[in-house]
Amino acid sequence: MQAKLDLRIRQLHDAMDQVRTADLSSIQPRVGVVGNTFYMNVDFSGGVSDTELANVVSLVLANIACLKDHLKAWCKEKHALFHGDALIDSNREVAIIHDLWNRDKHFDLKQSRSGLFPELRNISRKASLTTRAQAGSWVAMTLDPRTGQLKTHGDGKVELVIDADVVNSTGARVGGLTEIAERAVVGWETTLAAAGVSLPVR
């Protein structure tokens, strides 16, 4: 059972790693001049299709949400208390991911564990600039108009991130998918560890 659960958690880590990449080599800005007008165009999708983006998102949702059933099986075998449903009911991000997974499977969402009846809109890949958690940290990204080359500066991180808007039943945005998913993973890993599951190092 430990080996199966270990593999499942590693699959989750792999799916989450597909959401973020620090490799900017696929981004080829277009620059040029028309008359007296200089233009530039930066497409952060890097040629990744809408279908490929949607597949990554579906994989992330499935790998997070299915932890409930895997933990339930673990707890049954180890005679441990199962707190998966309590986690979904008490953790907003975990509940949102669970709802999005059910919508992804069934198209329609008849019940909502989060109460938000969430759905995804505007799946895309974008640049994310993040400073370190310390005073004076900075990060910037520039584009050389002569060569079209992207350059990063500072001690922070520049990543390409697959993300989407999570909206509720009225269409109001409740957050970004990537941040919600990352918080949900923390929630599940904390609950797994509390049940005695040995977590693989990421």
Image (cartoon, rainbow, N blue to C red):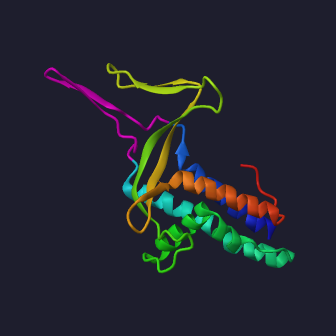
Give the vertical position of 97 relative to 49 (above or below): below
Give the vertical position of 197 relative to 35 (above or below): below
The residue at 52%/71% (across/down) is: 115
Query: Along the horizontal axis of the image, is 14 left or right of 7?
Result: left
**Is any part of residue 197 visible from this angle?**
no
The magenta segment is: 24-47
Quadrant location of the N terminus? Answer: bottom right
- Most distant residue in the left direction: 35
Q: Is residue 40 magenta?
A: yes
Query: Along the horizontal axis of the image, is 116 left or right of 137?
Result: left
The residue at 43%/47% (across/down) is: 125
How many numbered badges does the structure rendering display? 0
In front here: 84 or 171?
171
Give the vertical position of 117 relative to 127 (above or below): below
Query: Along the horizontal axis of the image, is 149 left or right of 179?
Result: left
The residue at 47%/67% (across/down) is: 118
> Residue 61, percent across and down?
55, 63
The residue at 32%/21% (across/down) is: 145
> Residue 139, percent across and down?
53, 27
In front here: 155 or 88?
88
Give the vertical position of 178 relative to 157 (above or below): below
Q: Is residue 133 magenta?
A: no
> Residue 19, percent across and down?
53, 50
> Residue 144, percent across and down?
37, 21
